[in-house]
Amino acid sequence: MAITTGRAVVLPDGRLLGYAEYGEPWGHPVVSFHGWPGSRVQSAWYASAASELGLRLIAPERPGIGLSSRSSTPTLHQHVADVAYLLDRLNIDRFGVLGVSGGGPYALTSAAWLGDRVSTVALVAALSAGSMGVTPLIQVTGWLGLRVPWLFAPGFDTAARVATWNGPLAVRLAFSTLPPSDRVVVDDPFVRDVAVRDVREAFRQGGRGMRGDAVSLLTAPDFSLGEIRNPVHLWHGDADTIVPIAIGRATAVALPNCSATFLPGEGHHLGIPHVREILEVFA
């Protein structure tokens, strides 16, 4: 169930931080960091399981995405600081963090910077911190994005126009290249409905927010994975064509307290069919 599908808190510098809540209002809090592209809507995929397990999912949006104001200098650390402020306003001291796909680096940054406030970390088909395990092509793309961001602006702006003009078409195009293991998952009408609403919110303000988020994701973090002592649970499929399993393996090796589950034949959207197993680590 959705506790609230869209709210915003005013941050100390005047920006807005958009978020949604799913599950049980008085349940154990879990911050759910969305993928890339993505928005607060994405966590609706996990709402039913969260309710069954007595969890309260809090799904914040990164700068320039959905209801969140843009930032001139978005970084992993800035967003985690924004989320910590939101949690303080909600009177939440200790919480779990869930990082799916592009939400992974934000979940890891939360553990590194917020320490014991983070009870447990779950990473699902997740990117790691910086360029760990990333292919050379993506590393070069990230390097160019940092230095000549205007080079990629037309592509992001086109994606934004398609997403807002015809969300179903945008989702159909995105899903068309997925492997069979993922297509079985995304053919579900509910999964597609959430995806359409999600992509519209992701590009609600145009493509600039997604560009900034992409740069943040590929920027070297100001911590090492070896510093993270929180318990981390990681899931990754060997048929993932979006975030290759090499990234999951490298992340698992680098984290000192990580329990990794590698699933043969599973693709990038394994978090949907395995949601209950994943969320049980927070229950």
Image (spheres, rainbow, N blue to C red):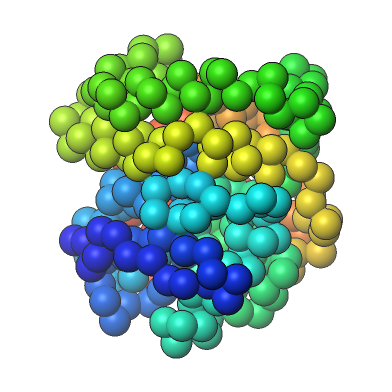
Give the camera-side residue of 102 and 84.
84
Q: Is residue 109 above or below residue 156?
A: below
Would residue 259 be seen by someone viewing this image from the given angle?
A: no
Q: What residue is shown at x 51% (from left), y 83% (from top)?
A: 88
As drawn, 82 above or below 174 = below
Q: Residue at x 26, y 39 (%)?
A: 197
Total marks shown come to 0
Task: Please indicate whether residue 243 sits to the left or right of residue 50 in the image.
Answer: right
Quadrant location of the N terminus in the rendered image = bottom left
Report x, y in % for residue 101: 53, 40
Which residue appears farthest toward the front when viewing the image? 14
Q: Is residue 98 left or right of residue 72?
A: left
Q: Is residue 207 visible?
A: yes
Vertical arrangement, residue 59 with respect to residue 117, above or below = above
Q: Quadrant of residue 132?
A: top right
Q: Residue at x 38, y 23 (%)?
A: 161
Q: Quadrant of residue 148?
A: top right
Q: Position of residue 233 (x, y in %)?
A: 57, 56
- Residue under the image location 54 percent in, 51 percent down: 70
Q: Quadrant of the C terminus?
A: bottom left
Q: Name the image quarter holding residue 196.
A: top left
Image spot of residue 39 (x, y percent)? 41, 46
